[in-house]
Amino acid sequence: MQNAVAYITSSSTEQERQPALHEADATVSPGTCLATRRLVPERCTHGRGRIRPKEARGNVIEYEILLLFDAELPEERQNEIVTRTRELVERGGGTFEGHDVWGRRRLAYEIDHKAEGTYHLLTFTAEPGTLDEISRVLKITDGVLRHMAVKRAKPGATPSGPPPSTDREPEYAESFAESGAGPETDAEQQLEGEE
């Protein structure tokens, strides 16, 4: 019996000397093993209150919004809406680049029983959150019949897809003629007429 007790005590002292095999294992909670170091580093805020400063976001995108106003809306009210949109862009950290008045135009279909509208094109750069706020405000603004915001195409951007090939047209013409599915030529019509 003393041998059994001696074996237990000696094996328990050996376990104390050896580090646990699962010490750095994330599946075992730290309270059940002898792990003393943290596996996840703490976030360093340096007193800013956020992980990154506002200037480091770099998610500024070039947009344009086409506004469709009621044609009977006074010009002063149209300018107020454009000014408010400009203020929202600048308050959101973006830059307002331009305002182009397209004028009064006939609509393809009536909107709210109105056959004409006045178009304004606004160009600016802003973050996506700012664009969401602008769209929210324009949806609830009286006098705005429709608005559409899109990312501006960069100058010199190529269209997607392969470039058009000039040598493909004869290839199709040859295969079309060989298949016999094309229109009959005058010579073929004459031969059929003689038979």
Image (tube, helix red, strand yellow):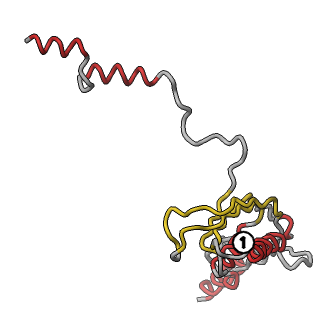
Q: Which residue occupies 61% across, 68% down?
A: 117
> Can the viewer see residue 40 in this picture?
no
Is residue 158 shown above or below 123? above
Q: Position of residue 165 (x, y in %)?
A: 52, 27
Label 1 neighbour load within 10 Å: few <14, some 14-19, many 20+ = few
Out of 25 and 94, give the one closest to the viewer: 94
- For the C terminus, the image quarter is top left
Q: Quadrant of residue 84?
A: bottom right
Is residue 151 shown above or below 142? above
Out of 12 and 110, give the one closest to the viewer: 110
Left or right of 143, for residue 169: left
Out of 49 and 92, give the one closest to the viewer: 92
Left or right of 195, for residue 27: right
- For the N terminus, the image quarter is bottom right
Q: Position of residue 105 (x, y in %)?
A: 61, 61
> Can the viewer see residue 80 in this picture?
yes
**Residue lying furthest left:** 195
Q: Which residue occupies 71% across, 73% down?
A: 134
Q: Which residue occupies 23% across, 20% down?
A: 184
Q: Quadrant of residue 41?
A: bottom right
Q: Which residue occupies 12% across, 14% down?
A: 193
Q: Position of residue 94 (x, y in %)?
A: 82, 66
Residue that carries the numbered disc 1 in the rendered image: 129
Count of marks overlaid on the render? 1
Secondary-structure class at tag 1: helix
Name the kind of residue labelled 1 in the image. Answer: Gly
